Image (cartoon, grey):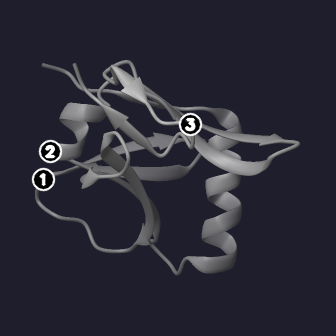
Amino acid sequence: MEHSINVTPSAAKRIAEVMASEGGAGAFLRIAVSGGGCSGFQYGFTIDDSRQSDDRVFEKDGVAVVVDETSLELLNGAEIDFVEDMMGASFQIKNPNAASSCGCGNSFSVG
């Protein structure tokens, strides 16, 4: 089964900015799903520079987003976006696998 994650141009631009200011050579954005949060699972965003054997790499506009195989099962088909509005600026994940999510958008449950 082919897995995919879509990184929007807005998210790619912001990732490039973060990597330029905080990441070293070869750094990338790692997105992981872990147990916890108010809805059962929560998203984690970290800057990393070492890849694991089960990592999948998704590239957009020259930036890399890395997701481990276990997290990818819960993120397959998701869209990673960067949104700026009156409430602030943040990465947002539109996840088709989430049955529900909390108000903060960082936590979700599956059906």
- How many residues crowd mark 2 within 10 Å: few (<14), some (14–19), many (20+)? few
Q: Is residue 65 above or below residue 76?
A: below
- Compare marks 3 and 1 and give the one earlier in the sequence: 1
Q: Which mark is residue 54?
A: 1
Residue 108 coordinates in the image, percent (x, y): 37, 35
Residue 83, image x, y percentages: 73, 39
Is there CB contact under 8 Å for labels 1 and 2? yes
Report x, y in % for residue 82: 67, 42
Q: CA distance from mark 3 to mark 1?
A: 31 Å
Residue tagged 3:
103
Residue at the spot of label 2 = 70
Between disc 1 and disc 2, whose residue precedes?
1
- Tag 1: Cα neighbours inside 10 Å, few (<14), some, or many (≥20)? few
Image quarter where the N terminus lies is: top left
Q: Say the numbered circle drawn on residue 37.
A: none
Q: Quadrant of the C terminus?
A: top left
> Is 109 displayed left or right of 80 in the figure?
left
Mark nearer the N terminus (2 vs 3): 2
Most distant residue in the front direction: 38
Q: Residue at x 35, y 49 (%)?
A: 42
Q: Residue at x 39, y 24 (%)?
A: 100
